[in-house]
């Protein structure tokens, strides 16, 4: 079976760790760097609850940091549930990959590379996201937005791979054995939200 690298190269998709577009002079995001950082923190809290962390301290932390209003309706519903289904937990656990993408956008991650493996959860929890109950302002203030050309190129690469994945899936063509569809989907989800057109709960990843 082909690898993701071979598949991408056959489609003229960059396989570099970092990609760059020279045509991004007027490129702009639909969210401020502060809002992106807050969204990443919220995602980590929700993901933690999906991994069976008690929700009450997470909710209390969000209130203390004055970001509860930025938690989406569906996230609030999930956090307030007395019992959570395995299906619901799995869905929110997967969003750690979208969180990782947002962390890359604000300079907390060096590169994304091809979507062939899950994010580094140890680094995410112990080195990047502020610990539960602590002040998130230093984390937000230290965020540095990636350059427009880098953002545009990575977003285009993710979208192109997503479209080709669905084309090959529909046409029953061989797909890379190491392509991680969950990672690709969550990256696509994050980039779609970054455009600022759809609310987080309502993002659609058309191809």
Image: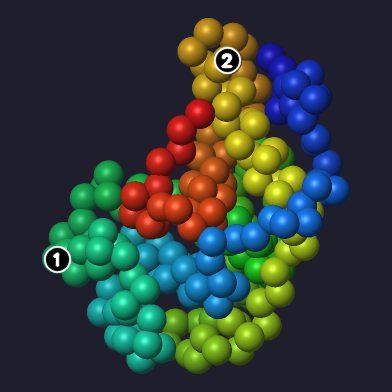
Apparent side of residue 20 relative to residue 130 in the rendered image (left or right): right
Q: Residue at x 37, y 65 (%)?
A: 46
Disc assigned to residue 168:
2
Apparent side of residue 133 relative to residue 6 in the rendered image (left or right): left
Q: What is the quadrant of the N terminus in the image? A: top right
Q: Residue at x 69, y 38 (%)?
A: 157
Q: Residue at x 66, y 68 (%)?
A: 106
Q: Residue 108: where, in percent of width, then height?
A: 68, 69
Residue 84 seen in this snapshot: yes
Taking the view exactly as shown, the residue that stands out farthest to the left is 82
Above/below status of 113 relative to 4: below
Q: Residue 109: where, in percent of width, then height?
A: 70, 63
User: Which SS class for mark 1?
Assistant: loop
Disc assigned to residue 82:
1
Check if mark 1's residue and mark 2's residue have beta carbons within 8 Å. no
Apparent side of residue 94 relative to residue 172 in the rendered image (left or right): left
Q: Residue 204: where, in percent of width, then height?
A: 41, 41
């Amino acid at each position: 079976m082909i690898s993701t690298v071979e598949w991408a190269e056959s489609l003229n998709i960059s396989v570099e760790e970092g990609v760059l577009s020279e045509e991004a002079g007027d490129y702009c995001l639909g969210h401020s760097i502060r809002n992106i950082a807050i969204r990443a923190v919220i995602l980590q809290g929700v993901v933690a609850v999906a991994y069976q962390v008690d929700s009450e301290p997470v909710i209390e932390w969000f209130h203390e940091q004055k970001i509860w209003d930025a938690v989406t309706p569906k996230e609030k519903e999930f956090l307030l549930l007395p019992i959570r289904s395995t299906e619901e937990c799995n869905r929110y656990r997967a969003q750690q990959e979208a969180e990782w993408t947002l962390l890359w956008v604000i300079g907390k991650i060096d590169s994304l590379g091809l979507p062939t493996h899950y994010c580094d959860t140890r680094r995410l929890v112990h080195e990047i996201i502020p610990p539960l109950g602590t002040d998130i302002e230093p984390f937000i203030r230290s965020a540095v937005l990636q350059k427009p050309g880098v953002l545009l190129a990575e977003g285009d690469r993710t979208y192109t791979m997503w479209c080709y994945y669905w084309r090959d899936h529909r046409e029953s063509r061989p797909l890379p054995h190491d392509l991680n569809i969950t990672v690709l989907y969550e990256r696509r989800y994050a980039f779609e939200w970054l455009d600022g057109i759809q609310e987080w709960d309502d993002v659609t990843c058309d191809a």
